[in-house]
Image (cartoon, rainbow, N blue to C red):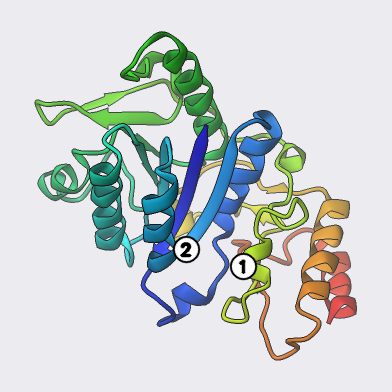
Amino acid sequence: LEVLLIDPCFGDIGLANEIIPLSVGLIGSHLKKQIPEVNVTVLKKSTDILSFLDNKKPDVLGICNYLWNTNLANRLSHYAREINPKTYIVFGGPEVNKKPVDEKIFFQKYSHADMLIEGEGELAFIQLIKTYLEERKDSKKVRLRINELGNCFYINEQHQFVSGPVFSRIKHLDGVPSPYVTGLLDHFLEDASYQPLIQTSRFCPYTCAFCVSGKNRGKLRGYPIEQIKEELMYVSKKYSDRPHHTMYLADENFGILKRDVEIAECIKKCK
């Protein structure tokens, strides 16, 4: 199975384009751990994505959708379908919400999507791929059973949401391997135009109204500290010839855990 995961952007312009796509990287590394025989590729630049679609024609296209790339993401998904009508298209990311501000616009944008994933994507995407592989054995056209797919939904012909069960969030992040250490993101680390992005924990206990994370509810969870240190060392060695680059942290509230002091010391050492 050929799976392409994208966080699409235009060329080399804009801050969002300079950041390594950690979100789809985490989903890809978790997928490879659970189903090793699947080929997973992570891409960001639209030119790279178009070239891959032309040459590889992936079975599954997973798209991380943000406010700033939603139109590009949709255009690329339509192109993927033109190249290979059998490509199974999955949308996820912050812009995917079963309670959109404007349902009419939402339906127009995503009615062609085979499936949409709301919330954390790792568990939902793995279950989707497992079901896809089972269905593909028995049928020429894959029709996934929505009742088996947590956090997933699609738009039917009557413009209604059809939803599966709700998955709880990953309780322990030690099951999610680093996409850096596994080598899945090496081609980004070797490209001088990209800046590294690291996440050491997820969530924040506060529900501030001015923060997009304030709407979330859940337990603050951290990745294993040894995995974080290994990741920091791995990335810093890759960037040893580019000391002017910046490493970004994707934590909602770095510094809230006692261990964050130890992580900060490791970051200083890596510098």
Which corner quadrant of the image does residue 99 belong to? top left
Residue 55, compared with residue 236, is above or below; it is above
Q: Secondary structure at mark 1?
A: helix
The quarter of the picture where the C terminus appears is bottom right
Front residue (pair 159, 63): 63
Which residue is the site of mark 2?
44
Q: Amino acid at mark 1?
A: Phe
Q: Secondary structure at mark 2?
A: strand
On the rendered structure, is 79 left or right of 200? left
**Measured from the top left, where is residue 154 in percent x and y?**
27, 30
Crowd class of label 1 (few under 14; some 14 to 19; many from 20; radius 10 Å): many
Q: Earlier in the sequence, mark 2 or mark 1?
A: 2
Q: Amino acid at mark 2?
A: Lys
Residues at marks 2 and 1 touching, judged by CB atoms closer than 8 Å: yes
Q: Is residue 209 visible?
A: no
Residue beneath the point at 16% across and 28% down:
160
Residue beneath the point at 31% across and 31% down:
86
Residue 155, compared with residue 22, is above or below; it is above
State the residue lying farthest toward the top: 138
Residue 149, compared with residue 2, is above or below; it is above
On the rendered structure, is 21 left or right of 111? right
**Measured from the top left, where is residue 152 in percent x and y?**
39, 30
On the rendered structure, is 191 left or right of 121? right
Which residue is the site of mark 1?
188
